[in-house]
Amino acid sequence: MLRKIFKTLVAGAMAGLALAGSALAQDRITLRFSVGANDSATDGMALGIKAMRDYIEFRSNGRIQVRLFFNTLGGSLQVTEQVKNGTLDFALTDDSVLGSFYKPMQAFQIPYLFSSSAVAWEFMNSKFMRDMAEDMRKATGIRTLALSENGFRNITNNVREIKAPEDMKGLKMRTMQSQVYVNFMQSMGASATPIAWPELVPALKSNVVDGQENAATTVLDGKLFEVQKFMSVNEHIYGMHLIIFNDAKFRALSADHQKIIQEGARLHAAVANSRKAFDAMGAVTKIRESGTRVHVSSPSEKERFRQVTQKPVIEFIATQAGRDVVDRVLAAAEEARRAVYGE
């Protein structure tokens, strides 16, 4: 009799454990995150993504698992489309790509919109940016969780040192296939030639173009410094990364899970911002040590570039994003500048 009672109790306990385990398994969710770039043990973007994943999994006690896909589900355009249509939960994309989904985002391509990374970071956390992100969510179903630094673009060439806009006159410059960059170069008297990335080094070697513009880390990693005599750290256009989430999927999560994911995205931004800025300085140092002559533009020199290049690009962007949007972006950027410098 006692043996039967014991067996009954054990069976009941095992059934209870099975039900508890089943409930726990049902409480666990797996989120798929993608970025159209390679994994890296040192890059600020990759480090920030991994920090976000680790934070989300830790704070949720393992109830949220984040699967990372580096450069496997497509580039920024493809992963943004996947987030929008719900086949991917969340991803890292950039502001230039989002401009195809939400036109006001194109205004961030204005040259010298931000005078420094510090001003850009202030702008990212502004009420204006929160309002714009909310408007994009309503218009597209794409929710923005955090913004982070992609980096400033700089000029290299084989003809002369660039310290002022006038120094660009007559140079043949490679750009991306974008009217923003074409107008930017033409405003200084340079010609713009779109050339695909794989063809850039041969084009520089054969003098098809005199120079190009890119982030310092790209100049270093792509070994462009090996075929360029001069580099100007003029920081003309600032690129942003955004952690985006399918809005319907996000709203279906519990309130606790939503907060944990939002916190993780903010951690990504903190890690990526500091590391990206630090790596850019390190890249410039290595480029200089390689023998390339480097000039770092002063704030007053950058202001001169701003005065010459902004208007022609603004005129084009206003036709795409709207003049009202451009004016509000410029006003918010100026407010961020004053907040940083106490003016």
Image (cartoon, rainbow, N blue to C red):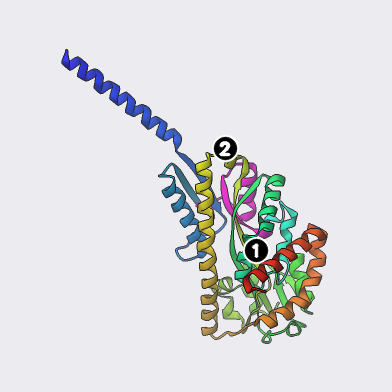
| Helix, strand or loop at mark 1 | helix
Amino acid type assigned to the residue bearing label 1 in the image: Phe
Q: The N terminus appears in which quarter of the rendering? A: top left
Q: Which residue is mark 1?
A: 123
Residue in view at x 77 percent, y 79 percent: 188
Label 2 neighbour load within 10 Å: few <14, some 14-19, many 20+? few
135 horizontally vs 89: left or right: right
Residue stretch rendered in magenta on the structure: 69-96
**Furthest-left residue in this view:** 2
Q: Which residue is mark 2?
A: 252
Let me know if residue 92 is in the magenta part: yes
269 horizontally vs 140: left or right: left
Please tell me which residue lies in front, 55 or 127.
Answer: 127
Q: Is residue 309 visible?
A: yes
Closer to the chain start, of discs 2 and 1, is 1
Q: Quadrant of residue 122?
A: bottom right
Residue in view at x 69 percent, y 58 percent: 128
Label 1 neighbour load within 10 Å: few <14, some 14-19, many 20+? many
| Inter-mark Cα distance, 2 to 1 | 29 Å
Where residue 71 sits in the image (x, y, percent)? 54, 55
Where residue 247 sits in the image (x, y, percent)? 62, 43
Where residue 196 sits in the image (x, y, percent)? 67, 66
How many callouts does the rendering have?
2
| Helix, strand or loop at mark 2 | loop
Q: Quadrant of residue 246?
A: top right
Please tell me which residue lies in front, 310 or 80.
Answer: 310
Amino acid type assigned to the residue bearing label 2 in the image: Ala
- 167, above or below 197, in the image: below
Where residue 32 sits in the image (x, y, percent)? 52, 46
